[in-house]
Amino acid sequence: MHEFSLAQGLHSQLLDLVREHDMVRVKKAIVLIGENAGIVVDSFVFGVNVLLEQYPETKGMELVIEHDNGQDLILQSLELE
């Protein structure tokens, strides 16, 4: 299940960005998942949600998934507090 590994990578990136910008937490993240990326979106979202609740920096974060025809998984934008 590579979706959980991808979720871990995204979550790690979110934590790094919180620290890098001296912020407290991530309020919202928009992630683009290409239709041809080979990612089971429901499994990815489940993994992300499990990780979000384990850390105060991401607990309660809104995750928005957008789609295109590409092959990428991209953190498009985030809102930090």
Image (cartoon, rainbow, N blue to C red):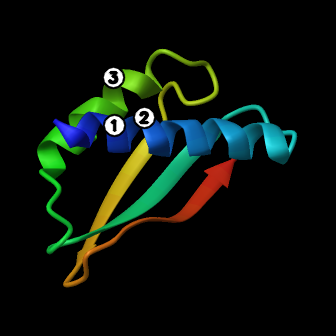
Q: Quick check: marks 2 and 3 in contact, CB under 8 Å?
A: no
| Residue at image point 45% right, 60% down | 30
User: In the image as oriented, which residue stretches furthest toward the bottom?
Assistant: 69
Disc 2 versus disc 1: distance between alpha carbons? 5 Å
The local secondary structure at tag 2 comes to helix
In the displayed structure, 70 sits above or below 77; it is below
Which of the two discs, 1 and 3, labels the residue nearer the N terminus?
A: 1
Image position of 5 (left or right of 27):
left
Residue, far right: 22
Quadrant for residue 4, please give it.
Answer: top left
User: Which residue is painted at 14% across and 62% down in the image?
Assistant: 38
Of circles 1 and 3, the one toward us is 1
Contact (Cβ within 8 Å) of mark 2 with mark 1: yes
Q: Secondary structure at mark 1?
A: helix
Amino acid marked by disc 2: Gln
Write down the quadrant of residue 56 in the picture: top right
